[in-house]
Amino acid sequence: MPIATGNVTSTATAVYTSSGNTAVTFLSICNYSAANVTANVFVVPSAGTAGNLNTVLSSILIEANDTYQLYAGNEKLVLGNGDTIQANASANSAVTTVTSYYSA
């Protein structure tokens, strides 16, 4: 399974974009900084924008040097072509994501 990595900033930005139909099997959000941060994660339909209607994590606290896993084990999130996973955080240069997926 391929992986995609992304840097998270204070502005909601795509950390994964589906090409064709894909299933996300793993998503982690890592705070590699020495301070606590909060983060938001959105699952956004193609050509849509991040907002309250597509929030899957809201203001989640990620402690310093800690990681939060959104999808793990046998869970899957099925995305269509152009759908995105977007994220933002309370601090720049503090948070990254790793997404594992497979194409249908």
Image (cartoon, rainbow, N blue to C red):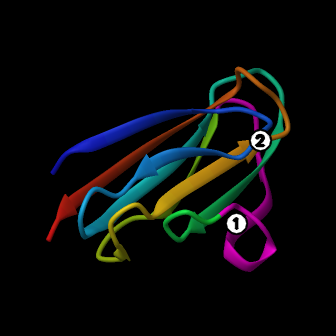
Characterize the local packing of mark 1: few (<14), some (14-19) or many (20 or more) Cα atoms within 10 angstroms: few
* Residue lying at 38% horizontally and 65% vertically, measured from the top left: 72
Closer to the camera in the image, 15 or 100: 15
From the top left corner, tell me how far across and down residue 91 is, in percent.
82, 30
From the top left corner, tell me how far across and down residue 16 is, in percent.
44, 49
| Farthest-out residue, front | 47
Residue 57 is labelled as 1
Q: Earlier in the sequence, mark 2 or mark 1?
A: 1
**Left or right: where does residue 14 sit relative to residue 79?**
right
Marks 2 and 1 sit apart, C-alpha to C-alpha, by 11 Å
Write down the region rendered in magenta: 49-65
**Left or right: where does residue 23 sit relative to residue 55?**
left
From the top left corner, tell me how far across and down residue 63 is, in percent.
76, 40
Closer to the camera in the image, 86 or 63: 86
**Left or right: where does residue 5 sit relative to residue 12?**
left
* Residue 90 position (above or below residue 38): above
> In which quarter of the view is residue 7 placed?
top right
Question: Does the magenta run of residues contain 21?
Answer: no
* SS under mark 1: strand
* Amino acid type, label 2: Ala
* Residue lying at 29% horizontally and 76% vertically, measured from the top left: 74
Which residue lies under the disc numbered 2?
89
